[in-house]
Image (tube, grey):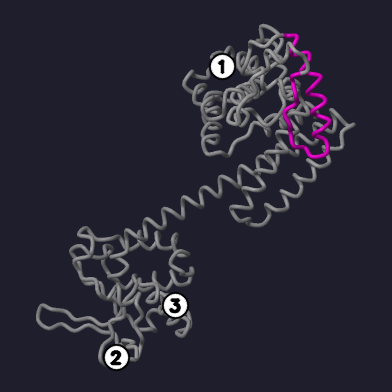
Amino acid sequence: MTYNPVTPFRRTLDAAILKHHSRTQKDLPPSGVNKWEILRELAAARTAFDLSDRDISVLQALISFHQATLLGGNNPDLVVYPSNKSICERLNGMPCSTMRRHLARLVQAGLLLRRDSPNGKRYARRYGSEKTAFGFDLTPLVQRADEIRDTAETIRAAQEQYTRLRETVSLMRRDLAGLAEYGAELRPDLTVWDQFSDLAILTARDLRRKQPFDALLDIETRLNTALVAARDILEPQETAVLSTTESLSEQHHQNSDKDSYESEQTNITTYIPEVPNKCTSKEDNETPPALPDVEQDHKLPRIPLSMVLATCTELQTYAKGPVRHWHDLVRVAETIHPMMDISPTAWEDAKTAMGPEEAAVVVLCILERFETIRSAGGYLRSLTAKANLGTFSCGPMIMALMRRDAA
């Protein structure tokens, strides 16, 4: 036979409520808790406590009856005793039955305690210097302040991570749509551009709804695969390799151009880039090229070098020779950024956040619009801040310049 403890008015007390009944005033933080601050933290963490926004509204109305801003500390009296009518008035006329239901949820969540009087009324009596109050005790809210803050911080971090991922996916979708349009004009003989365009359209449709985090990760993986394939089709894969390895011979570069075109044909149906076999002769077997690792590939812009060169024509004025590879582009940006009043610190920060190649593309895009930009250094720093948050891509800048030239 089990025993279910009850209040004088037959309200059962479960384990969660008894747990907070067992705590004493010694558990209260000595400095007290700002009631509006803890309410904001609880509102951010309400899903973890199985509370709704209306539950939080009822709690806000209830704690407004506590005159002091600090709960606890020098004011250990944490019992409020408003009538149901007074609570409903502060809730803009919420029905009393609805208000009682939300109060029960707050008690069940362990954030309030009922201090019932013998006759069921809420009131306070003074006996000399002592005060006895019957109503709702806010002590659990103060005792669990640290738990509420930690939970709110965890939820905010998860939300920020989700927001960054969604913005990254949105940028990748825009880059893929632009590459599909550019590739269809440059290589209309390939049908793969329709696949890229369809993927961008379907991604835009999916982003209209709030996708789960795992679903966004899957979308990001598909977009990244498509972007790498599109970049490899529009320019030989060896461009990325040679940008980090300047010691390769010109003879090997000519052979790899042929192989990259063959690998391009294999990418048309699946748009998954494959590393072509460069060992076509004994000489090639002796000195195989070093392929970039995954991190280096991720640092490269998601647009082909040829697209940058076709759009940013001002760089030819400052280039000492032909720009064939990404490291040539970075060298040009290294030369011109002091002329644009971009400090070395801003340039180094941009390279760290974006990668040297994408930072070089950004500097060249700024150069194209240098007359209309008030502070090139400040503009680069603002883009660097976005890159640190994972919400930046140089693709839209290139697309905007292309549209300007086409107008």
How much space separates mark 2 and mark 1, taking CA atoms? 78 Å
The outermost residue toward the left is 128
Viewer-nearest residue: 132 or 236? 236
Element under label 1? loop
- Does the stretch in magenta take in 78? no
Which region shows up in magenta? 250-279
Asked if disc 3 and disc 2 are in contact, CB closer than 8 Å, the reply is: no
> What residue is shown at x 76% (from left), y 45% (from top)?
199
Q: Residue 376 at x, y = what percent?
A: 56, 23
- 104 over 213 or under it: above or below: below
State which tag comes first along the sequence, 2 or 1.
Answer: 2
Q: In the rendered image, which quarter is residue 7 located in?
A: bottom left
Other residues around mark 1 within 10 Å, as few (<14) / some (14–19) / many (≥20): many
Q: Quadrant of the N terminus?
A: bottom left
- The residue that disc 3 covers is 102
Q: Is residue 81 visible?
A: yes
Q: Quadrant of the C terminus?
A: top right
Q: Residue 116 at x, y = what percent?
A: 28, 85
